Image (cartoon, helix red, strand yellow):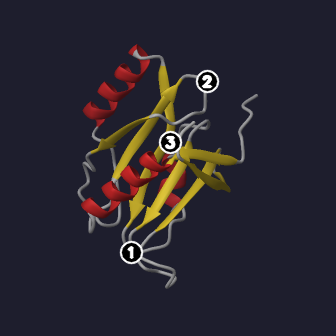
Amino acid sequence: MLILSNMLTITQALYDQIVEHSRADHPDEACGVVAGPAGSGRPERFIPMLNAARSPTFYEFDSGDLLKLYRDMDDRDEEPVVIYHSHTATEAYPSRTDISYANEPGAHYVLVSTADTDGAGDFQFRSFRIVEGEVTEEEVRVVQAY
């Protein structure tokens, strides 16, 4: 049975890299992975990916790039700890499509909204667990170092 924490702990540097990538790719959705040592649950290596769809409303990883990524993570004894993408016109909450594509039950799914949807500022950064179609929001704790 998979036991999941209800909090994402991430360094300020990784947080900033995810937000920067999301802003840089706007108005298209940005996407990527933060890998960590297998079994650790600790995000360490930032891996921005190309949105093969090049779309403001949808993202997809290029299948060749994704295969290379998984081979590289396997060689390094890593796993995807965070899978992130941005929403450019809506809040940072998983869409039906996002939920249907969520196939890493151990990963934190981070969404960054680059749309000012609630007047709270120019982005939202939220993390979710998505397991068998069930979405659970979790707390995000940003630290200077692990």
> Is residue 72 shown left or right of residue 99?
left
Quadrant position of residue 73: top left
Of callouts 1 and 2, the N-terminal one: 2
Q: Nearer the viewer, mark 1 or mark 2?
A: 2
> Is residue 28 shown left or right of residue 90?
left
**What kind of element bears circle 2?**
loop
Q: Residue at x 27, y 66 (%)?
A: 26
> Is residue 104 shown left or right of residue 7?
left
Of callouts 2 and 3, the N-terminal one: 2
Residue 57: give x, y in percent of width and height.
35, 66
The amino acid type found where label 3 is placed reads Val
CB under 8 Å between discs 2 and 3: no
- Which residue is outermost to the front? 144
Q: Residue at x 60, y 32 (%)?
A: 41
Q: Residue at x 44, y 38 (%)?
A: 34
* Residue under numbered circle 2: 39
For the residues labelled 2 and 3, the Cα–Cα distance comes to 13 Å
Does 3 appear above or below 142?
Answer: above
* Residue under numbered circle 3: 82
For the residues labelled 1 and 3, the Cα–Cα distance comes to 22 Å
> Is residue 67 shown left or right of residue 124?
left
**What kind of element bears circle 3?**
strand
- 43 and 83: which one is in front? 43
Residue 15: give x, y in percent of width and height.
46, 52
Disc sitting over residue 89 in the figure: 1
Residue 16: give x, y in percent of width and height.
40, 54
- Density class for disc 2 (Cα within 10 Å; few <14, some 14-19, many ≥20) is few
The amino acid type found where label 2 is placed reads Gly
